[in-house]
Amino acid sequence: MAKVLVLNASYEPLNITSWRRAVVLLLKDKAESLEHNGRVIYQNFPLPTVIRLRHYIKVPYREIPLTRKNILERDRHTCQYCRKRGEQLTLDHIIPRSRGGIDSWENLVTACMRCNVRKGNRTPKEAEMELLIQPRKPHSSLYFELLKYTRDDLNHEWRKYVIGIN
């Protein structure tokens, strides 16, 4: 059912939890409610959509693996040249490997077969093709989970607390 974005005391996103767990944290005074969607759980108790912990939790940094699945997810299964969506997508090196391009978050994008062949062994500028969005590495390991919940403007309240979700 309803999911709740949990922020650290520093306002950085920590995780996504169920509304029940969020209510327990609020009732135990371990968190405060920052956003709600207007729905009420009990009498005048609004259903939270974003909560912030009262005490800072130290979270170890986790590297996000550079995989085909993660690149496709970051680019929302959309060709970054023509906006075509679907399953028949490839990965394209912006700077081709034959010209020193490496496998990195900033050099790999999702492309349909037609655009990838059209671009060939050239840069987008040489091929007169424009990238929709400049690719970059996701900010946190929570990025892909957040993408799922913000896709169709579900939980639009989350957007102001999350960097890199458009």
Image (cartoon, rainbow, N blue to C red):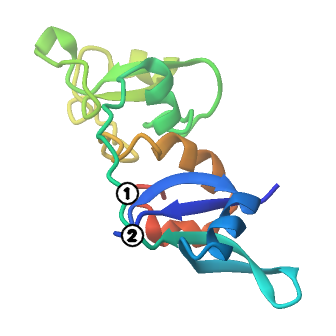
Q: Residue at x 36, y 43 (%)?
A: 138
- Dividing the picture into quarters, in which one does residue 51 lie? bottom right
Residues packed near mark 1 inside 10 Å, few (<14), some (14 to 19) or many (20 plus): few
Is 34 situated above or below 70?
below
Q: Position of residue 114 (x, y in %)?
A: 50, 20
Q: Is residue 44 above or below residue 65?
A: below
Q: In this rendered view, identify the residue nearer to me: 22 or 146.
A: 22
Residue most extreme to the top: 98
Q: Quadrant of residue 91?
A: top left
Q: Is residue 151 visible?
A: no
**Which residue lies most toward the front here?**
28
Quarter of the image containing the N terminus? bottom right
Q: Which residue is mark 2?
A: 9
In terms of image quadrants, where is residue 5? Answer: bottom right
Q: Amino acid at mark 1?
A: Ile
Residue furthest to the right: 43
Identify which residue, 92 or 74, lies in the foreground. 74
Tell me the residue at 61%/56% (across/down): 150
- Per the image, the residue denoted by label 1 is 57
Vertical position of residue 87 compared to residue 76: above or below: above
Q: Residue furthest left?
A: 100
- Residue 22 % position (x, y): 66, 64
Q: Is residue 43 left or right of residue 28?
A: right
Kindly indicate whether the residue at mark 2 contacts the one at mark 1 (C-beta within 8 angstroms). yes
